[in-house]
Image (cartoon, rainbow, N blue to C red):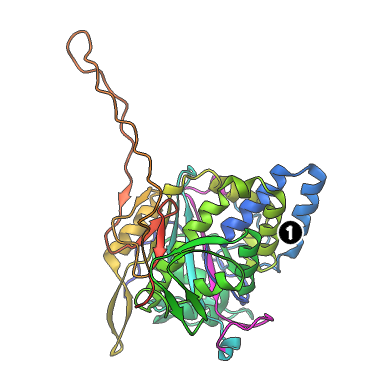
Amino acid sequence: MSEPVRRSRLSSSTARHGRLRTSTTAGVIARFISAVLAVVLVSGSAIAAYAVWDIASSVAPPVALANETPGASAPDIDAIEGGVNLLLVGSDSRQGQDAVFGDVAKETAVLNDVTMLLHISEDHSSATVVSFPRDMFVPIPSCPKEDGGTYGAMAAQKINTTLSYGGLACTVLTVEKLTGLSIPFAAEVQFNGVIELSNAVGGVDVCVAEPIEDDYTQTYLDAGTHTLQGMDALQFLRTRHGVGDGSDLGRISNQQVFLSSLVRTLKSSETLTDPSKLFGIAKAAASNMTLSTSLSNINTMVSIAMALKDIPLDQVVFAQYPTEYGDINGYEGVLPLKGPAEELFDALAADEPLSLSGETGPGSVIDPNAPVKETPAPTPPTTPAPNGTTPPTAEASEPGVVLDKSVQGQTAGDYTCSKGNQ
């Protein structure tokens, strides 16, 4: 499997990296940093100072990435050409958590069953979240060990093994190799973080088109709209057997139903004007996250929040990495669909806005009761100039890159419903 052409310069310096604890879905880092900023803005100075200190003191010791120089200051996101990339990974490990999350045999497992790349455009006008299917076979590069040695490279392994193989730094290196993008920031969130965050925001409304019944995660939802928080929210995000075709690809599109609704909830006035709710979100996230060294700086968090807070809902794109089934050492497995994937990451490297042309995915459908979007006012006809010529008009804005139909997903402005596995 050939490596894509590098689209940005990657540092070769090697640093120590650590093991992740646990995590689940994405968008969490955006919630955390946005909440930190909001607490500062809406609170008095003394209260804000305490809030930031309390939140910062809750964050676990950071993890150094291989592309970080020891002792170097965190990069300024406004100084990074071509936008900012941040990786969010999550493990289904049960280590260090009091609640029981199903299969006790996974208490010692360290698999990144959730891997998401967040790209924020350089002009802060759009954001893209790409989900990587956990069972996709990819090349894993040589990764640094904590003792200073290295793990050998592997030609093809499931992407969700990178966390157990070499920690957060190895997952970042693997996604960099796969996409050709430089990723200076990374984060990990615990299972408990999803529970506490959904509680702090007051629950997330999700639409269910067909009943969901999953004995594995104890998720049972009738058709209709449900406000999910706590353990119910976590199990909804974890369910695979209960949605779509029962695959991880169906689970990803089901997660996007939740995430798009979450983004709308976070951008609503009810959340942004409630200091206690904002503090609760930030505190819950900080207490259940492991950050890369570059991301553990408060100023960096605030700058990313500033970049995210005004992006229109229709410009927040959730995309699923395109895949196909193929032969892996005599067995059928999930493989990257190279052409459409290269188009996707070429567009991100060029910092182009993206448009989806494919379906939402096997685990979701368009909400038939979605609010009707406003239609832009028609452009008035051009009035001819006195001499009969047509006056020059303003140059039309670039429409961005329309992705191949194999790239499934939705925007935060799209209202979708979970599709039960029938």
Q: Position of residue 14 (x, y in %)?
A: 57, 70
The structure residue drawn at horizontal position 52% and vertical position 66%, both measured from the top left corner, is 12
The structure residue drawn at horizontal position 64% and vertical position 64%, both measured from the top left corner, is 199
Q: Quadrant of residue 210?
A: bottom left
Q: Nearer the viewer, residue 117 or 292?
A: 117
Q: Quadrant of residue 384?
A: top left
Q: Which residues are magenta?
A: 76-103
Side (left or right) of 403 relative to 66: left
Q: Amino acid at mark 1?
A: Ile
Q: Secondary structure at mark 1?
A: helix
Question: Label 1 crowding class (10 Å Cα cut-off): few <14, some 14-19, many 20+?
Answer: many
Q: Quadrant of residue 184?
A: bottom right
Side (left or right) of 357 relative to 12: left
Q: Is residue 79 magenta?
A: yes
Side (left or right) of 241 relative to 404: right
Up/down of 94 relative to 258, above or below: below
Question: In the rendered view of the protein, which quadrant contains the N terminus?
Answer: bottom left
State whether the magenta stretch is mostly helix, strand or loop. loop
From where the camera sits, is residue 45 visible? yes
Q: Position of residue 252 (x, y in %)?
A: 42, 69
Q: Position of residue 79 (x, y in %)?
A: 55, 46
Question: In the rendered view of the protein, which quadrant contains the C terminus?
Answer: bottom left
